[in-house]
Amino acid sequence: MTEKLLSLANLDPWLARLRERGSVYAPGTDQAGEVALREWPQPEPLVLDYKNFREPPKAFFLPRNQTLLYFRDGKTVELNSAVPETFLFGIRPCDARALALLDRVFLDGDQNDPYYARLREKTTVIALACAQAMPSCFCASVGSGPGDGSGADLLAVALESGLLFRAGSGKGEGLLAEAADLLAEATPAAKREAAERIQGVTAQLTPVPTADSALRLRGSYDSPLWGTAGQKCLGCGTCSFLCPTCHCFDITDEPDRRVRTWDCCAYPQFTLHASGHNPRPTPKERWRQRLMHKFRYAVENFGVPFCAGCGRCIRNCPVSMDLRTVLKELGA
């Protein structure tokens, strides 16, 4: 694994080189005053000490509304498959790990998704290790951590004097090689500082019981706790739309095109049959499905929970539903 140092003075020149190849998105303050991924360059300086974005970066790979093909003269016309090169700088490790989980759905196996695959191939992901944890963060409890580089081509750790880069893929190795004149060798002191910073953030995390979640949830399918938890749920979909691993979608044929749109298992119509029957008629069944999907079915199908521990669903739920509480009460 190649490790290099980039001084803060060389950060903008490095991003400028990437900008010559394609679009660059980096942390900046949006019109609402929140830190978000914004196209670079920006009038304001880059923000490196943010906690996390409100919205995950999954929309770069699975757009909210995506035209798949057009209808012309009774025939289907595929979109131009040319995709511009894109660089995402500064996403947190939980969101990079979430991309690795989405890869399991859209890239692994015989039936991979060509739309997702094209965007993933042309996008370089540069993650930035966390400098602090929020009370809702629990990434270490789902196999990740504040310095997890999985899903990223490069992982950067912010140090006192600059950024320590660690290559996580061939793309990442290539970026470091191309920027050799801007980089320095990672010293033992820099590596120690990076490890200490990551360990410090890890110590801030409160463990959540997810071990043996699939087995325990299998035995909790009929628990009355689902009904109690479901009474609070508004079915607004905030948890799913802000989740970096939720990926359910609907496909609609419009007069001139076929469109893929985000969908959500919290909606009553999500499982409504044409006959009028709905196998998940109340919030109880829909809330149960959400946790079962992430902590039981995903474990049974892929070997890992489909949760990155980012805590967005906890922070943004309008009625303060907390899946950590439900997991603890179910003994999962």
Image (cartoon, rainbow, N blue to C red):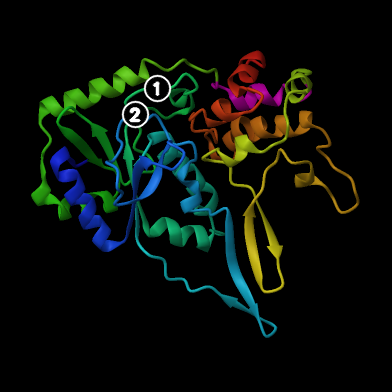
Q: Which residue is mark 2?
A: 130
Q: Position of residue 328 (x, y in %)?
A: 61, 15
Asked whether residue 60 is in view, the answer is yes
Kind of residue at badge 1: Ala
Q: Residue at x 45, y 27 (%)?
A: 139
User: Relative to residue 270, is residue 145 depicted above or below?
Assistant: above
Q: Quadrant of residue 134?
A: top left
Q: Does the residue at mark 1 contact the one at mark 2 (Cβ under 8 Å)?
A: yes
Q: Quadrant of the C terminus?
A: top right
Kind of residue at badge 2: Cys
Disc number placed over residue 1 in the picture, else none: none
Q: Which secondary structure lies at badge 2?
A: loop
Q: Quadrant of the N terminus?
A: top left
Q: Position of residue 199 (x, y in %)?
A: 30, 20
- Separation (CA) of disc 1 from disc 2: 7 Å
Q: Which residue is mark 1?
A: 133
Q: Position of residue 131 (x, y in %)?
A: 31, 26
Q: Which secondary structure lies at badge 1?
A: loop
Asked whether residue 332 is in view, the answer is no
Q: Which residues are magenta?
A: 210-222
Residue toward you, 2 or 185: 185
Q: Residue at x 49, y 40 (%)?
A: 55
Q: Residue at x 55, y 17 (%)?
A: 209
Residue toward you, 157 or 299: 157
